[in-house]
């Protein structure tokens, strides 16, 4: 059991394109922990992270990192080597969940998880000949909808692939699924109420996600009982099968043709500001932002801690 005298390093920033979003999450977490009486210390992550952790005498790490070198198992591995317990998923679950192709392959054949047809494109190759438009183009590694595009023709696909390949040499191409996007936060293995995402543009891209007024959110989601049950089950299956810990968030599209939730991805370190989707879901069942942050902290662990 953690005592409030421990030095909690809130790791934020990092080296990925999601650094600005991570800084917002980290600052919100620091304030929440301090409000609950914890000795929270902001730690901006760069290549001198091991030195910073030693200088600040960090006892436990609250990970508010997003993207590469933070959400993908790299920092988790460093913390394991240093013997510092940390929040969220471990090295393997983090690395697999960060890669959209690896995630889909790991969940392939899982009863209860429906996924869209997909193809994999690698920089320099010809794209698959059996594509059907429209196509959703996603860098295999990345988050915050950065680099994601909807291509309705070959010229649009060419442009989208050029942009996606600037972020990652492997790109996931998925058949477009028409319907409403929802997200299911999972806390310690238990699904929270579902949030429905309603972008004004009809496509939840970076602009819709981070521009004020471009998207509205509905929680609890006004969806069918079938969709609610299936999405909650699928989110839990993904969480367990990938070996996630703490707080994670799975995204789905409710397919308009039959009302079936189609799994998109799972985020092992979801956004953590007071207005982010996971805290929004928690709030709907009476879990305040500060309480959620503290609960995640109390679940911090590492292989060394488990052995002890």
Image: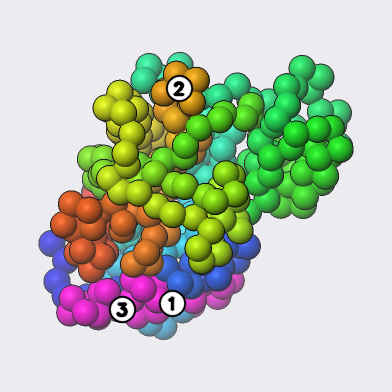
Q: Which residue is mark 1?
A: 43
Q: Residue at x 69, y 40 (%)?
A: 150
**Front one among 27 and 76:** 27
As drawn, is 65 to the left or to the right of 305? Answer: right
- The Cα atoms of the two marked residues, 1 and 2, are separated by 39 Å
Q: Residue furthest front?
A: 200
Helix, strand or loop under label 1: strand
Q: Return the x and y of residue 34 as percentages of the image width and height.
A: 24, 80
In the rendered structure, which disc, 3 or 2, sits on the residue that comes first in sequence?
A: 3
Q: Secondary structure at mark 3?
A: helix
Q: Label 1 neighbourhood size at 10 Å, few (<14), some (14-19), many (20+)?
A: many
* Cα distance in 3D space between marks 3 and 1: 13 Å
In the picture, the disc for residue 31 is: 3
| Label 2: how many Cα within 10 Å (few below 14, some 14–19, many 20+) | some
The stretch of residues the image draws in magenta is 26-51
Mark 3 neighbour class, 10 Å CA radius: few under 14, some 14 to 19, many 20 or more: some
Q: According to the image, label 2 marks what residue?
A: 114
């Amino acid at each position: 059991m953690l005592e409030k005298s421990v030095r909690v390093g809130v790791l934020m920033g990092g080296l990925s394109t999601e650094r600005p979003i991570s800084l917002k999450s980290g600052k919100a977490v620091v304030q929440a922990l301090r409000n609950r009486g914890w000795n929270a210390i902001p730690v901006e992550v760069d290549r001198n992270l091991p030195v910073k952790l030693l200088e600040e005498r960090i006892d436990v790490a609250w990970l508010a990192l997003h993207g590469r070198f933070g959400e993908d198992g790299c920092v988790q591995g460093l913390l394991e080597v240093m013997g510092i317990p940390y929040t969220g998923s471990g090295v393997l679950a983090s690395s697999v969940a960060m890669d959209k192709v690896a995630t889909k392959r790991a969940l392939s054949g899982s009863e209860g998880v429906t996924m869209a047809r997909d193809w994999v494109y690698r920089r320099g190759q010809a794209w698959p000949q059996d594509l059907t438009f429209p196509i959703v183009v996603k860098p295999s590694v990345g988050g915050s909808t950065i680099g994601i595009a909807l291509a309705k023709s070959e010229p649009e696909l060419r442009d989208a692939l050029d942009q996606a390949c600037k972020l990652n040499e492997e790109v996931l191409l998925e058949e477009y699924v028409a319907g409403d996007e929802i997200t299911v936060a999972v806390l310690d293995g238990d699904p929270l109420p579902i949030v429905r995402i309603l972008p004004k543009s009809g496509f939840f891209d970076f602009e819709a996600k981070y521009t004020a007024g471009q998207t509205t959110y509905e929680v609890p989601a006004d969806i069918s009982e079938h969709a609610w049950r299936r999405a909650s089950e699928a989110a839990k299956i993904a969480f367990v099968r990938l070996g996630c810990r703490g707080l994670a968030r799975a995204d789905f599209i409710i397919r308009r043709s039959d009302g079936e939730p189609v799994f998109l991805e799972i985020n092992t370190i979801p956004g953590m500001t007071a207005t982010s989707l996971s805290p929004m879901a928690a709030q709907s069942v009476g879990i305040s932002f500060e309480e959620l942050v503290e609960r995640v902290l109390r679940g911090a662990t590492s292989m060394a801690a488990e052995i002890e």
